[in-house]
Image (cartoon, helix red, strand yellow):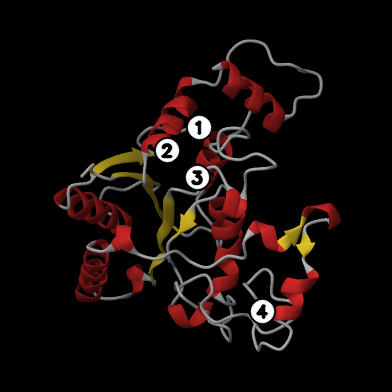
Amino acid sequence: MVSKKVLIVYAHQSSGSFNSAAKDAAVEVLTAKGCAVEVSDLYAMTFKATATAEDITGKVKNADHFCYGEETKLAWEAGKLTADITEEQRKLTEADLVIFQFPMYWFTVPAIMKGWMDRVLTLGFAFTHEKRYSQGIFKDKKAMLSFTTGSQESMFSANGINGDMNVTLWPLQNGILHYCGFQVLAPQIFWAPSHVSSEARGTMLEGWRTRMQGLLGENPLAFTPLDCFDGEKGYQLKPEVHEKHAAKEFGLTVGTHLGKALPPNNQMKAGV
């Protein structure tokens, strides 16, 4: 049996952080299970977060009206992306599972991790107009978010001041991971570890260690397949799909909710 390859894209400045402990636990447990684990420690790498023309070696097609998506697609095809990008693309190509480990900043990933997504997931390499969502380039790979929050879990509820965490996760999990085709595993959320006891933090890590024993066998979150949308009509949901769900209590997903109540835990638990 060929061992699975795991890439952990990690973004925290401190080796003494809870995020570092979560990353180390993942490396330890998954390695012990026979996986080949590689870590991209973005701060340690001083990874460049800005998407600019400097990401391309040599001349660009149109310097006067530089279009990052189109120019990096051409550079990827010609082998002219910079070494830091091509190295991360190599890691991603080889990986069966990608874990993004980070502290949630302003309801999303830290800038350095967003920069990794902007620069590494280039047009052509990670997606095309034809190959995206359920028909995406990375449809045979799994990916997941593992992160800490500053706020308590109750604050990210449907009645909480921060709003429903399922809604917060939609742009990241649908708009980036699923967009590129990844099978998205349920997120591992460590709720406000800085506000609980060391014993409680230890319990959180043990829960993560336990989950990783079966992580690669987990079913992914549910998203509406691309062929349920009509590409000739602005990618609107096909009438027959809409009609099929007309009498149901909940919408299809957090994003494609059909004006109905959001399906509970759609972005946080598989099988719902």
Amino acid marked by disc 4: Gly
Q: Dot 4: what SS?
A: loop
Instruction: Kindly indicate whether the residue at mark 3 contacts the one at mark 2 (C-beta within 8 angstroms).
Output: yes
User: Which numbered dot is residue 251?
Assistant: 4
Residue contact at pointers 2 and 4, CB within 8 angstroms: no
Q: Name the residue type under label 1.
A: Lys
For label 3, the SS is: loop
Q: Is residue 67 above or below residue 265?
A: above
Mark 2 or mark 3, which has the lower sequence index?
2
**How far, Cα to Cα, is label 1 from label 4?**
39 Å
Residue tagged 1 = 48
Q: Residues within 10 Å of mark 3 (few under 14, many from 20)?
A: many
| Disc with the residue nearer the chain's start (2 vs 4) | 2
Residue on which the image places disc 3: 138
Residue 236 position by quadrant: bottom right
Residue visible at 59% across and 80% down in the picture: 263
| Residue 56 visible in the picture | no
Separation of residues labelled 3 and 4 (CA atoms) = 26 Å
Which comes before the other along the chain, label 1 or label 4? 1
Q: Are marks 1 and 2 in contact (CB under 8 Å)?
A: no
Of 176 and 256, the residue lying toward us: 256
Tell me the element at label 2: helix
Q: CA distance from mark 3 to mark 1?
A: 24 Å
The residue sitting at 22% across, 46% down in the picture is 35
Q: Is residue 101 above or below residue 255?
A: above
**Amino acid type, mark 3:** Phe
Check disc 2 and give the amino acid type.
Leu
Badge number at residue 92:
2
Asked if residue 257 shows in the view, the reply is yes
Dot 4 alpha-carbon crowd within 10 angstroms: few under 14, some 14 to 19, many 20 or more: many
Residue 79 in percent (x, y) is at: 54, 17
